[in-house]
Image (tube, helix red, strand yellow):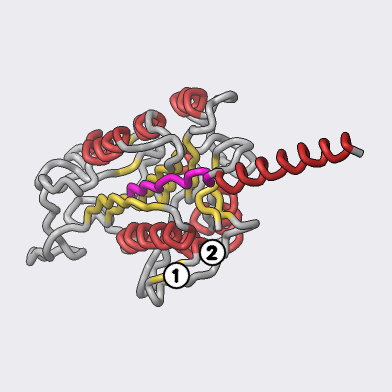
């Protein structure tokens, strides 16, 4: 009888201590989301203007901040935008605009983008998440067509080629992100942005992969890479264009519009409610959740006989998933 009382007392003490430790244990840190959002409409340059890119950049920034607030996650946003200056009086087949001041540090030149990402290295913690979002033109090798540094805003040179200073390549951008602490997500709404995504069942292309892309994938997405690798969510495959509607009063790229809806953003009211985002599942929003939502809800087919008829979003990250928010 005495022995039973002894064991009962010991059991009770261990139980109390276990419970008290559990109650005192702090929840895992949520970390901070750092969003570098980039948008160019190319007014003031000598390439085709885009109508929805600045809406994309602004509302993506607002939506991610609202989603962070809803989930109790800290948020820091950094905006790099090229929008052109005043309308010029010169006659032309299209309206002509002055170019942005090249000394503006928020102008998304190649140098300013890479410097902004590099500046995060001093403040990022392992539990943080960095998202780099881009809406603009994409070159046929996947490079981002960024703002020129010349005051005339020339992207095409006189010989018809694109100035190399205006091309931010796959390898350069991935290298810059890979050096940062914590998890990284690259979201791209641009033509041929599937060049950033390794071939998989979600990425079906009709052209051969360039050798330099093979090298990039081996470097950044090889088996056995640590968990803090770069995830990529792209609007389309490497051999197709990213599109936006031509008759919308408030245009977005088809991909970005579906992404915003998946986050719960209401573009009519300019905010989101207090409900879990539509892309949320089992108390979380992840890269996989967002991809599935976009694939099912974007307002353009994901397959077709001709490239202008469809747009197939793609995702990389291997067998792992990247959780963005928990609720």
> Magenta residues?
26-36
Residue ID at (40%, 43%): 130
Q: Secondary structure at mark 1?
A: strand
Classify mark 2: residues with Cα within 10 Å, few (<14), some (14-19) or many (20+).
many
- Dot 2 corresponds to which residue? 277
Residue ID at (40%, 47%): 32
- Dot 1 corresponds to which residue? 272
- Is tag 2's residue or tag 1's residue first in the polypeptide sequence? 1
Q: Nearest the camera: 130 or 186?
A: 130
Tag 2 near tag 1, CB within 8 Å: yes
Residue 239 visible at all: no
Horizontal side of 323 relative to 13 (left or right) equals left
Horizontal side of 239 relative to 156 (left or right) equals right
Above or below, 272 against 109 in this view is below
Task: Give the x, y percent position of residue 201.
Answer: 64, 41
Query: Which of the image's four quarters has the C terminus?
Result: bottom right
Q: Secondary structure at mark 2?
A: loop
User: Is residue 185 rendered magenta in the image?
Assistant: no
Task: Give the x, y percent position of residue 212.
Answer: 44, 25
């Amino acid at each position: 009888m005495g022995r039973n009382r002894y064991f009962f007392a010991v059991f009770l003490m261990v139980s109390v201590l276990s419970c008290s430790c559990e109650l005192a244990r702090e929840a895992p840190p949520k970390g901070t989301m750092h969003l570098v959002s980039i948008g160019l409409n190319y007014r003031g340059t000598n390439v085709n203007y885009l109508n929805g890119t600045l809406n994309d950049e602004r509302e993506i920034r607002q939506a991610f901040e609202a989603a962070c607030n809803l989930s109790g996650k800290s948020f820091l946003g950094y905006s790099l935008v090229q929008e052109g200056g005043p309308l010029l009086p010169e006659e032309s087949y299209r309206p002509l605009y002055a170019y942005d001041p090249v000394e503006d540090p928020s102008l998304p030149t190649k140098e300013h983008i890479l410097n902004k990402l590099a500046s995060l290295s001093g403040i990022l913690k392992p539990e943080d998440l960095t998202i780099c979002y881009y809406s603009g033109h994409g070159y046929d090798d996947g490079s981002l067509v960024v703002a020129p540094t010349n005051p005339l805003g020339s992207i095409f040179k006189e010989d018809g080629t694109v100035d190399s200073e205006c091309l931010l390549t796959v390898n350069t951008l991935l290298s810059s992100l890979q050096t940062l602490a914590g998890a990284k997500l690259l979201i791209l709404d641009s033509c041929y942005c599937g060049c950033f995504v390794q071939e998989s069942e979600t990425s079906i292309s009709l052209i051969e992969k360039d050798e330099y892309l093979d090298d990039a994938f081996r470097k950044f997405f090889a088996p056995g890479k640590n968990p803090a690798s770069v995830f990529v969510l792209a609007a389309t495959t490497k051999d197709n264009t990213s599109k936006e509607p031509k008759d919308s009063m408030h245009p977005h790229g088809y991909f970005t519009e579906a992404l915003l809806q998946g986050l719960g953003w209401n573009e009519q009211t300019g905010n989101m409610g207090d409900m879990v985002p539509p892309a949320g599942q089992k108390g979380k929003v992840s890269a996989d959740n967002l991809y599935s939502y976009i694939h099912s809800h974007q307002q353009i087919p994901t397959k077709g006989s001709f490239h202008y008829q469809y747009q197939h979003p793609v995702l990389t990250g291997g067998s792992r998933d990247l959780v963005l928010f928990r609720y």
